[in-house]
Amino acid sequence: MRRTNMAEDSFCPKGGAFPMATGVTPARSGDPVTERLRAVQDLCDRGEPLQSMMTAVTAEGLTPAERRRLDANALAGPLGTRLDLAVKRGAARRREFVTLLQPYLAGVDVRVKRELPVARRIAFHLIEHRAVDDLADGDALQKITTAAAEPSRRVRRKLRWYADLPLQDELPEAMFRLRAADLIPMTQVEDISWSDGRLRVSGHAYLAGLSVRGPRFNRATVVLRGPRWLPPVRLRTRRIFHPEATYGAQEAGCNYDWSGFTAELRPWALRWRSAVRLAVRGGKRLLRRRAVVRDTTTWRAEIVIWSRGARATGLLRGPSSGRTERPRGLDLGRGWWVRPVWTSDRALQVVLQPTRAELTRVRLDGDRLELKVFLPGRGQSKGHARLDGHRMSADFTPVEGGTEVVVPLAVPSLLQERDGGRLWVEPKGDPAAAVMLGRAEESRSIVGEREITVLGDRRDRVIVSANRIRPVVSVATWDEDGTLTLGGSYPGSEPVELTLRHRTGLIHSVPMERADDRFSVRFAPAAMPRFGEAVPLSSGSWSMAAREASGEVVQLRVDHAILDTLDEEPKVRDGRRYRLVSTRFDVPVLTVAEDLPDDERGAGGLFALRRTFYPAERTRELSDATVYVAYDGRQYEGNVRAIYEERVRRGDGREHIWVVKDGAFVPPGAAELGYGSDIRPTVVRAGSREHYAVLARSRYVVTNGFLPPWFRAREDQTVVQTWHGSPLKRLGNDLPHMSRDPKPAAWHRQAVEVRGWDLLVSQSPWATPILRKAFGYQGEVLESGYPRNDVLSAPDREELAAGVRHRLGMAEGAKVVLYAPTFRDYDRKNASLRLDLAEAHRVLGPGHEFLIRAHSMQAAPNVPRNLGHDVTTYPDMADLLLVADVLITDYSSVMFDFAATGRPILFFTHDLQRYSAKRGLYLDLAAEAPGPLLSTGAEVIEAIRTIDEVAAAHAERYERFRLRYAPRDDGKATARLVDHVFSG
């Protein structure tokens, strides 16, 4: 239920004796400002009323300095976010926000308001000084928040920089001045390496919005800052030419070609400073009659940028994935190391670290894991060990040159734990010392179906853990043809397969060979098998895991011994870049990206294509070509496919151009389709220069969805909008947010798009007025029926269905049940199935095959192995409808398409009331659905078991449904459309 006050329905951005450690419980910070801010952010995240947030912010009990800190962080954080939401929600929300904020802002320190980011500074200035009615009913706040959402242009006046934002003629110039909160360095470190005993750090750093076109007036210095009074270390830094920074930037029109840098550190600069610190700290310990102990000195890396009169300082952040994430340390001798490391928030630090404890041996003896550690220096006879926060006994024995410590761990207790722990030793009277791996070998001990590992982390500290036996990659090679071979250790003999999982939930599987406690697997990322065809992996990151016959998934790890030699260079094949990297230290990931030319990369390249190249192409003469776009170029499917294939069948020799996104498919030519002619389609990559050109100069454009936002139809072009289904759920102007005032960006986007349509294809007379109203479309509508459904009535449909069954690996004579639910706007990340497939097979017995087809806007489904077929990525839905004997759906338009088959439809509407309230439906399913509405999985299974009786009971209603909602899906829809558009 929507709140009537400032509550929002969208979120604001944002142990003792052994057993083994799972981590030390974090201590409370004790900082009242941090605690208060956490409470305010929590209220914001939960969508609580603004009044509750203000009560938390204005509560007493803070010193003036603490009050200033709280106000600065609250205004820049949760209150600023809530301001953006209030501006979008209309006059009433703006009025409430301004009314509550005005008295609070009057009490905020002037210095706090002055140092806010410029857009926040201006917005809160308006709220404090202008009348409530003016801000609630006017558009001043909206202008500022809208402009702030886009990268703003910076302008220099004399020696100062200002933001180019609205209302400059109404507010003082100082209000627009860029201050420290606006000048934050954008950094990325791309390489950290040692050369001739020196640490070299390279990457790029710039101030957003301030172009860096050359080395003049352009300086950067990397500075290492240590504890308190130690003098900082300024690294020798120079600027270098680095155009990749421009390609990766988000600001169109900005040039950061000379934002590259390389910095060099001599370890001696750290050693003498740490020696001074050690002398001071050692002296204090001696005064307390304690022994001097060497400790670690940590230096945080900052970068200071001087750029065309602007100066800013910030942390050096952002390692490139791969080797840069795990930089090597340098052994300085006498037990000292220099190590560059990354913090949890991806900031660079350099540590000068002594080896106070070093692992020398690991031995597994029955139920006892024994770790032997050597402590150099004076002998110690007492102390204990820790595994993270858990203390345990240990044997300390003085030996020549130091102390030998034996740490016994109980194997049964280790095996009960999930998480690993870092090993420490604590001699009595001395600070704890992290145990370093040093020259010891890493250990993996198999105990039943689990393993106990003693490994070094990225800082060489010993980590002890117990986990499921994991595949460890020790061999990774690329062949000339783009095949990747992985091999390594994986004890066991059960069948197993490698799974590559995308962040969207998409999974590819490849069989693994397993023998003699080893495994190997070969696959070509550019040609992965999918339902009988080969497709490239889509762009993004693919995690790797082994899936055993039981269904258990075990993550792969990279052998630490090969990390320094692992080939992480990108491999280019068929216009795509494939790169195997070890991220998070030892986790293998395969990254995929399109290999773009320089002029198409980054915001600057896109800006030039849209603002310069495309308008110029639109002035050129049209070619008699047709551009086909199906689902933004992601699929060769549906109405668009049917139109193309009909024209090829007829021998239409005009140019046919398919837009393909991310290498998703290769459209067939006439020969592959079996038509005998030599017609071959042209393929253009979505987003490429050719994509802009063909949309600017082709006479026909056929699509089933919205075209790119930069596209503007010419008067002499014909745009055929086939859409992708008759509307059951509300869309377009009928969605609640589309009626807001002011209109959302989606409303304007749709209005511009629809004005370019010349023909809208409708499945039925019922759908036509709904589509017109939802899109605000006043042009021609062709009620031809949907071309994609012609195959369901084709004379050779039985032969086609047999081919699809074979491609899917369906058992001969099995009854095929297709489950195809739509997406939930309010639950898109849910990958669970409401239908219990194990119970279905138990009740129905053998002879049933289940196909699961999730919506492309819903998380990929978790389909149990051997109980169903995940066909979410199957190329064409029409093929699935062709083979389905029973359809289970909910609120998907697939019901209108499947009606042409006359086969039974079941409606699994377990959330009908909620879905109707959230999204809204055009159809009263209870009154008109051509099958039963079922609310539980048990009801669905029972309906399948008695499907003949269910179909007979709904036969009359089914026929009425087909005649009203799919009257022209008779196998001739494509011919009608092609005759109407292309035969003139």
Image: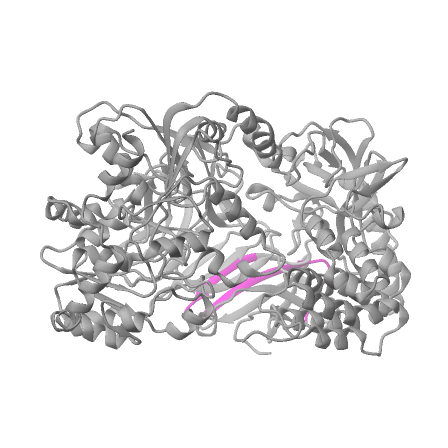
Q: Is residue 336 visible?
A: no
Left or right: where does residue 497 sit relative to residue 369?
Answer: left
Q: Residue furthest top?
A: 621
Q: Quadrant of residue 572?
A: top left
Q: Nearer the viewer, residue 195 or 542?
A: 542
Q: Is residue 609 above or below residue 125?
A: above
Q: Image point 65% across, 35% down: which residue?
A: 245
Q: Quadrant of the C terminus?
A: top left
On the image, which quarter does residue 962 sit in? Answer: bottom left
The part of the chain drawn in magenta is 360-381
Residue 684 seen in this snapshot: yes
Q: Position of residue 171 (x, y in %)?
A: 86, 50
* Count of numbered circles on the image: 0
Quadrant of the drawing holding the N terminus: bottom right
569 and 381: which one is in front? Answer: 569
Residue most toward the left? 813
Any magenta on residue 378? yes
Colour logic: one colour
Q: Quadrant of residue 306?
A: top right
Magenta stretch contains residue 683: no
Front-lying residue, 896 or 560: 896
Q: Is residue 610 left or right of residue 945?
A: right
Residue 716 is situated, as x and y percent measured from the top left of the image, at 44, 29
Magenta-drawn stretch, dominant element (helix, strand or loop): strand
Answer with left or right where residue 417 lies relative to residue 519. right
Instruction: Please state the horizontal and vertical placement of residue 136, each as a whole percent of the image.
Output: 74, 63
Vertical side of 616 occupied by 757: above or below: below
Please give left or right for residue 283 compared with residue 546 in the image.
right
Residue 900 position in % (x across, y down): 19, 55
Of residues 170 and 304, the one nearer the viewer is: 170
User: Residue at point 47% right, 31% down?
Assistant: 715
